[in-house]
Image: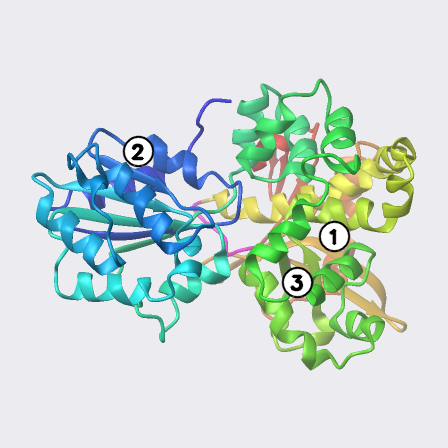
Amino acid sequence: MDFLNREHEQSLIRAELEKANSRFIVLYGRRRIGKSALLQHISNANTVYYLADINEAGIQRAFFADQLSAHIPGFASIQYPDWNTLFEQINLRLRQRVTIIIDEFPYLVKSSPELPSVLQKIIDLKQNSMYHLLLCGSSQQMMQGLVLSRSAPLFGRAHRILSLSPMEPCWLAEALGIKAPQAIEEYSVWGGIPRYWELRTEYPSLEEAIRELILNPYGILHEEPLRLFMDDMNNAVQPNSIASLIGQGCHKLSEIAGRLSKPATSLNRSIQNMIDTGYVARDTCWGESGRNSKKTLYRIHDPLSRFFFSFVVPNQSKLNSGHIDLVLEEFINRRSLYVSHTWEELCRKSVMKLEINGQTFLPAQRWWQQSQKKGSAEIDIVAESKDGHDLLIGEAKWQSKHHPDSIERELTRKLDILKPGKHYDRIYKLICMPDIENRNDGNTLWRNAGFVC
């Protein structure tokens, strides 16, 4: 699969490397998100790329010195007693400035805990005048702790810190050569992780790829979410339990805590960590304070993790017994409902792309009400214009059985229940369906799957 997108990240890194003074850059993100591919894509003849592994410090230094030999003849013929000596010699012996990239930097820190302090000293004393330094890592928690924590030696030293995010569905459509509706379905399983897309291209259909990559106990992605949790969290037991419950329909903190027989306050740190690393999202009802726990729901944000905790975890015994096709059939039967959740999330996210009569909008939220007296109601999309004068409400329907006119009438009914707490100059309605014709009818907008791409 060809290298896709990341133009913005490339331009930011290259702009730093073109500066007159030596730069210190940090890049981090979850495994398989494309960090190494990005780094190799921006590398040139003046780049030293070193991929760290799990080894003793002395062996790591020897491997690192070997990579430097292309720019410093004979550099690997010397045994360096410590990292300070090695970096000191790099600066002394280089004859032209290079860019040193250390990929999977946390592996080095595990064998050499003193290394961040060594680099702090080098940067503070400007002893790296002959090289730019770019550190990269997959352990999000560890990278944040090494650079973003106020107590970390390297805190405040970086000239640029980039957290690599998952890619958008439009790039998946390009990677697989498919149209927007099919890209939404694929995205609901693989998310925005390029390596998953690359693996997907080896199979003729989405169903076959799911069967062999995820459901098959020997599939390369069968335990991927568990490995991600172990990478990014100190203790993965509680996050794994929380994700399992969310995957089975427990979306309130009180429900999750009750099922675990623990006080809700004891889950706060784990849930916040899962949010910070992108695996879980917190949805607050539009118009409510984020502190109102009764109006807050949790969902698994990462698509592959959501699939895993929805279909793999509850069916592990079946899968281990060889009944893979039974679980695949369960997914096929629930496919439309499963994809509809991803569709709703993508539609909310895409609202900020809209411009209506010169107005743009704040991030969209859900709104819901569960009341015995007033009845239950839910609106998929609610967003206020940036100037606060207009309101947008919308519905995202993945299944084509819904008729657009009936959706519009239902939105009008729900608006009466919502009763916004302020007067708006205009209230726009947004109808999102995968196979509808894009058009604007007065204050009603109709958008198809291309809207999220």
Q: Report the quarter where the C terminus lies.
A: top right
Real-space CA distance between mark 1 and mark 2, rounded to the nearest whole angstrom: 51 Å
Left or right of residue 429: residue 41: left
- Disc 1 designates what residue? 412
Can the viewer see residue 358 in this picture? Answer: yes
Residue that appears at 64% across and 64% down:
286
Q: Which is more foreground, mark 1 or mark 2?
A: 2
Magenta-colored span: 358-365
- Give coordinates of residue 417: x percent, y percent: 77, 64
Among the two numbered marks 3 and 2 on one chain, the one whose residue lies closer to the N terminus: 2
- Disc 3 designates what residue? 236
Among the two numbered marks 3 and 1 on one chain, the one whose residue lies closer to the N terminus: 3
Q: Which residue type does callout 2 highlight?
A: Ile
Real-space CA distance between mark 3 and mark 1, rounded to the nearest whole angstrom: 45 Å
- Give coordinates of residue 186: x percent, y percent: 67, 32
- Classify residue 82 by image quadrant: bottom left
Residue 360 is inside the magenta segment:
yes
Left or right of residue 61: residue 15: left
Can the viewer see residue 438 in this picture? Answer: no
- Give coordinates of residue 172: x percent, y percent: 56, 29
Prevailing secondary structure class for the magenta stretch in the rendered image = loop
Relative to 424, say whether 206 is above or below.
above
Among the two numbered marks 1 and 2 on one chain, the one whose residue lies closer to the N terminus: 2
- Near-viewer residue (114 or 248): 114
Relative to 428, say whether 212 is above or below.
above
Mark identifier at residue 42: 2
Residue 314 is inside the magenta segment:
no
Q: Secondary structure under badge 3?
A: loop
Q: Which residue type does callout 3 highlight?
A: Ala
